Amino acid sequence: MNVTCSDRDGIFEDGKPTEWAALEAHAATCPQCAEEVRAWKSLSIAAEALRDYSASPSLWPRIERALAEEAAQNAQCAERKSWLSFLPSFSPAWQMALAGAFVLVLTISGGWIYYHRPVRTVDNDNSLLQSSALKEVESAETVYERAIDKLAAEAKPQLENPATPLLANYQEKLLVLDSAISDLRAQAGTNPSNAQLRYQLLAMYQEKQHTLEEVLEAKP
Amino acid sequence: MGTMGLALPWKARISSLPRERGTRVEPSEHFAGGPSRTAVDALSEDAALAAACRSGDLRAYERLYAMHGERMKNLARNVLGNPIDAEDAVQETFLKVQRSIASFRGQSSFVTWTYRILINTCYDARRTRLRKREVANDDSEETPRPEPRAPGAHPSLRMALERALAKLTRHQRDVFLLYEVEGFRHAEIAGMLEMTETASKNTLFQAKKNLRQMLEPPRSSAAETG
């Protein structure tokens, strides 16, 4: 087999043993090819300088420990997930179908609960009192009214015979307040759940209380 | 070019070494005449090793290490530039093999697959190191490759080769290291680097051509002195 200088690169790249032998024979008479072949082989020989297979005694124990630790962690994770082990037995299509069915059941349940919830329209109107709150207000009102009546009884002697023009004015004011209170109580009797009426009534009682306190303070 | 200082004195340094190492020619299909008995044995051993690793047998991993550990470390050291990173890469490779052995389908040999993981791990580590170096903006501490002791001193053969290899493309460097240093066949390299056997041969040719250009003394000065 004869080779020429132009065949050299092709043989370097993918030469068969017979082609290499022919190139070596050609190089014996061609100084340029001899130099190229020598340099080419020298690179392979030089590559040996990058070979260092010295033992690393600590490396395998280190790797073994890491492998064992990771295997133990994986085993723990597998135990934790074992209750879900039925899931992988379903194909992804079935898993999707199950998830869809679950969402559908949730939606229907939510809708049913929403439409069948107890309707409490009274709750929405804050100006109206519920029956339990109304009882509390009425009982508190009664107690308050009695306390003011006691106060009025104390002030009664001064008001019946007013010694000064100021006391006479207090008397007139109290008459107006009593009139307003009786009106409001009449309205509250017909509309007991109206919180606004109750607030107005409370304001009247408070005013009457303050007036009576002033009357008592004005005692000569 | 920065390769001037790396020029190898070919005749003085290498001509004394045995030349037979450079004549490695792989058996082709024309000569082999089908798979040999040893090749079949190797395949079955490879499959048995993969099966044992898949079953979680740590002794199988130990056997893999005994067979390939030092070679893996050497390859990693040549890619990463230092033995500490190389050991880390080998350890990480074994962990990755353990994690993903269930997905190994046997399309390539188990050992080939392991080396593919090793090479990818090494390049991941290189990228991470590069990013850290960019963040720290201080390559003096991170540079793993040893520098020449003095500007006038002649670099060693190993150092010169390492620096020249660093200038090659990734595939050229990988193929050179796997073929010339680790002694793998082109068929195995093709599996490791996911390329064709022909591409592996061509890449090696280009790598050696580039290395020769980088390591050869400048022709003009050589001609003047000669």
Image (cartoon, coloured by chain):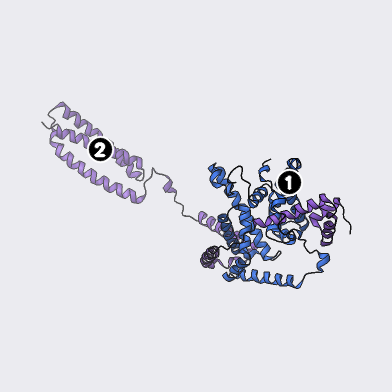
Mark 1 belongs to chain = B
Q: Is residue B60 left or right of residue B23?
A: left
Q: Quadrant of residue A145?
A: top left
Residue B61 is at least partly visible in this image: yes
Tint applied to chain B in the drawing: blue
Left or right: residue B27 compared with residue A125: right
The residue beneath circle 2 is: A206
Residue type at numbered disc 1? Gln
Image quarter for residue B14?
bottom right
Which residue is the site of mark 1? B213
Q: Residue furthest right?
A: A2
Checking the image for residue A100, the label placed there is: none
- Residue B129 x, y percent position in the rendering: 57, 49
* Label 2: how many Cα within 10 Å (few below 14, some 14–19, many 20+): some
Residue farthest to the left, as pictured: A220
User: Residue B149, how many percent across, how many down?
Assistant: 58, 46
Which amino acid, by three-letter code, is at mark 2? Gln
Say if A180 sits above or below A35 in the image: above
The residue nearer to you, when weighing B26 against B95, is: B26
Chain A colour in the picture? purple
Percent across and percent down for residue B80 are: 61, 52
Vertical comparison of A186 with A163: above or below: below
Distance Cα–Cα, label 2 vs label 1 = 109 Å
Q: Is residue A96 visible in this depiction of the protein? A: no
Which one is in front, B56 or B66? Answer: B66
In the picture shown, does residue A52 fall above or below B6? below
Which quarter of the picture shows residue B92?
bottom right
Circle 2 chain: A
10 Å crowding of disc 1: few (<14), some (14-19), many (20+): some
* Mark 2 residue element: helix
